[in-house]
Amino acid sequence: MTKSVFISFCFVLGLVLPAAAQTMLQEIIVDFTTLRRKEQVVEVTLPPGAKEVFYRITTFDPEKVNTGDALFNALRVVPPTKLQAEGYDLAKHGLVSTAKSGVKAFFFTDLAASKRFKEGSDVACKKLDSTQSVVGKLDAICQSEMLYIGLRPAAKGEPMTVKVEVVAFAPVRVDSSVDKYPYTIRNETDVELVYEISGNRTNWETFYLPALRKAEFRLAASPIYLRVSTQKNKSTVEYQIVADKQYRLYWNKSKDQIDLGEMPKKQ
């Protein structure tokens, strides 16, 4: 969602909380590096306050590179509490490699160490053995404002393309001065629901609403669009909603699916 549309969001039981810094999942970098015989270093700038940093490294034949599937798109639909939980299986979010060989990866937190890596050193805060596709989460020792990912071919051979992706939870500053339009949505089902908000029907932001809870938020635009899974056949239904009205997500028995309805205002 464009920054001009989505300004602030918060889960509350009653009043809208003042906008400040909200921690959200963000895509930090998607890099495609051609690797031959020499080492290469990918430089990553993490946002201030970033934590829970995830990475995905995949090797490809230069003629068969997957440029479409993004780690961010895979992780953004996972509930944050589940994604951040100890033991969550990240391996299922890996990509299929088309390369004939793998790559060794080294993570550094300072520029000097990354330069020494190019000279043959492998003193790093984290090392990955030869791999063709891996997804993981960095320990706190490897999280700093600057992150350097060193890549080294595991074996001599044909050139390969290495796709490096980094995603992290980080604070997002919001400007409360443009929060003009209030919205309210209540989940009247007994399960957590996933829904998305957009101002242009192109860029969508994902949110999670626990069972029997209310979300109140302010945006810089009205109307906006909301879409939610029907939970019947994995399809989604899109709605246009306007400010100052209250909406509810509920199970529509006649349609046999999740539906959105307007709540009457209290007299």
Image (tube, helix red, strand yellow):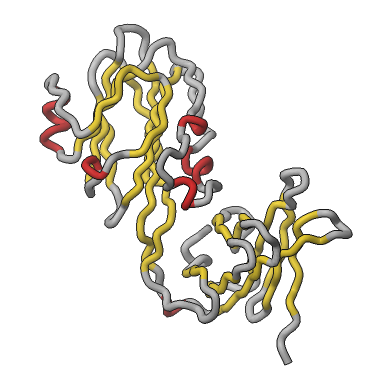
What residue is at 47 percent from the left and 69 percent from the top?
Answer: 8
Answer above or below: position of 249 versus 49: below
Position of residue 64 measured from the top left corner of the image (x, y, whole percent): 51, 19
What residue is at 43 percent from the left and 46 percent from the top?
Answer: 85
What residue is at 74 percent from the left and 74 percent from the top?
Answer: 262
Left or right relative to 189: residue 153: left
9, 200: nearer the viewer: 9
Answer above or below: position of 225 versus 176: above
Position of residue 43 measured from the top left corner of the image (x, y, whole percent): 26, 38
Left or right relative to 120: residue 16: right
What residue is at 26 percent from the left and 19 percent from the top?
Answer: 152
Answer above or below: position of 146 versus 31: below
Position of residue 44 measured from the top left corner of the image (x, y, whole percent): 28, 41
25, 215: nearer the viewer: 215
Q: Is residue 242 visible?
A: yes
Left or right relative to 149: residue 86: right
Q: Is residue 41 visible?
A: no
Left or right relative to 151: residue 67: right
Q: Residue placed farthest to the top in the image?
A: 157
Residue 242 lies in quadrant: bottom right
The quadrant of the image that shows the C terminus is bottom right
Residue 227 lies in quadrant: bottom right
Question: For the image shown, how many numbered marks are present on the structure?
Answer: 0
Residue 261 lies in quadrant: bottom right
